[in-house]
Image: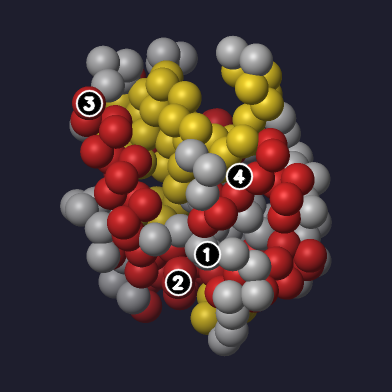
Amino acid sequence: MAGGRGSRLKMGEKPLVTLFGRPLIDYVTAALENSSVQRIFVATTDHVPNTRRWALERELDVVETEGRGFVTDMICAVQAAGVTRPVMIIMADLPLVTADLIDEIIEVYDTRPEPALSTHTPLCLHSRLGRRPDSLFNYKGQLIVPSGINVLDGAEIELEQEDFHLILERIELAVNVNVAEDLRLCEKIIQGDIL
């Protein structure tokens, strides 16, 4: 998902904001390309023409959505891509994600009976990083934060799907880039200043 305005970051098209000279979306697509994921679609909107161009230049499949909100655009993207099997939805602003982590999530999904899986990190991880997350849920007495990676049944994408909450205390899932402080935190993590 790469079609948001990135208005909080205020640095232009968020997927193309650079971290050590590489666009955020490049980190995510590289992780996907090195994982067991079979095909990558980049969902864009009219808000991100340069992101669309970037994806097309790299010969990635691009699906255009209307920019009417995350859920609406996600449904539109899955339908436009014609995916009727399980599909991983991942945000373009997760530069710390790795191929191994993506495969770990897929492996867990494959063992679960639920049609969907959502990934979360515990609030305590965010507290240790000095972050205040945008959203928070109480799940069975534990405060958790959505990470921006979900697996859904593409054939039922318009329906609400029962999901397994995969809670991982992984720094790679805890930092999505919404504001400039998030970008600086990613730099520190990549440099090894924060373990």
The first of marks 4 and 2 along the sequence is: 2
Mark 1 vs mark 4, foreground winner is 1
Assign a secondary structure to mark 4.
Answer: loop
**Quadrant in which residue 93 is drawn:** bottom right
Q: Amino acid at mark 3?
A: Thr
Give how far apart the Cα atoms at labels 4 and 2 are: 21 Å
Would you place residue 162 above or below residue 195 in this image? above
- Badges 3 and 4: C-beta atoms under 8 Å apart? no
Q: Nearer the viewer, mark 3 or mark 1?
A: 3
Where is residue 31 drawn, in percent x and y?
36, 63
Which of the two marks, 3 or 2, is nearer to us in this view?
A: 3
Please name the residue shown 44% across and 62% down the image.
28
In the picture, residue 5 is in which quadrant? bottom right
Quadrant of image for the C terminus = bottom right
* Labels 1 and 4: the sequence-earlier one: 4
Reading the chain from its start, which is encountered first: label 3 or label 2? 2
User: Which mark is nearer the camera, 3 or 4?
Assistant: 3
Per the model, the C-alpha gap separating discs 2 and 1 is: 8 Å
* Labelled disc at residue 67: 4
Return the residue at label 2: 26
Does residue 64 appear in this view?
A: no
Query: For the point 62% across and 36% down, which residue is it?
Result: 122
Could you tell me how far apart the alpha carbons at marks 3 and 2 are, in whole angstroms?
30 Å
